[in-house]
Image (spheres, rainbow, N blue to C red):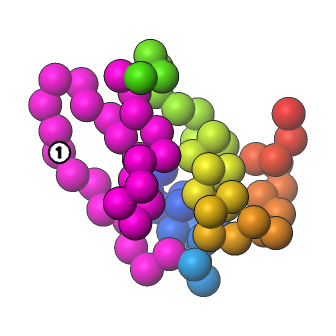
Amino acid sequence: MAQELLTTFADELGEVALVPGTGGIFEVRLNGERLWNKKQAGRYPEPKEIKQLIRDRIAPGKDLGHSDKK
């Protein structure tokens, strides 16, 4: 997923950091803003959901191709 984000947002993202946690923690943050929390959502996100959340904040006009399809 990290590599996919770097490829999709090559011009917008400088890095993707994976930080180990315990107890099933899974969060996605962008510049300190929590975009996804597995505990609150009750599930892991689909890759396209993460791409859309990030895109909506850093490149709203960017076409994500198949990730934008419902």
Residue 37's spot in the image, x, y percent? Answer: 40, 33
Image quadrant occupied by the C terminus:
top right
Q: Nearer the viewer, residue 65 or 30?
A: 30
In the figure, residue 56 lies in which quadrant? Answer: bottom right
Percent position of residue 58, x then y: 62, 69
Side (left or right) of 68 relative to 11: right
Residue in the picture at 83% in, 63% down = 63
* Residue at 21% over, 52% down: 19
Q: Residues within 10 Å of mark 1 (few under 14, many from 20)?
A: few
Does the magenta run of residues contain 21? yes
Answer above or below: position of 44 versus 28: above
Amino acid type of the residue that numbered disc 1 sits on in the rendered structure: Pro
Q: Residue furthest top?
A: 42
Q: Residue furthest left?
A: 22
Left or right: 60 with respect to 5? right
Viewer-nearest residue: 38 or 10: 38
* Horizontal and vertical percent position of residue 41: 48, 22
Query: Which residue is pictured at 53% across the width and 61% down the height?
Result: 5
Q: Position of residue 61 (x, y in %)?
A: 82, 69
Q: Is residue 21 left or right of residue 37?
A: left
Q: Residue at x 68, y 50 (%)?
A: 52
Secondary structure beneath dot 1 equals loop
Q: How many marks?
A: 1
Q: Which residues are magenta?
A: 13-39
Q: Is residue 16 above or below residue 39?
A: below
State left or right for residue 39 relative to residue 51: left
In magenta segment, residue 19: yes
Taking the view exactly as shown, the residue that stands out farthest to the front is 33
Is 42 placed above or below 57 here?
Answer: above
Q: Give the residue pinned by disc 1.
A: 20
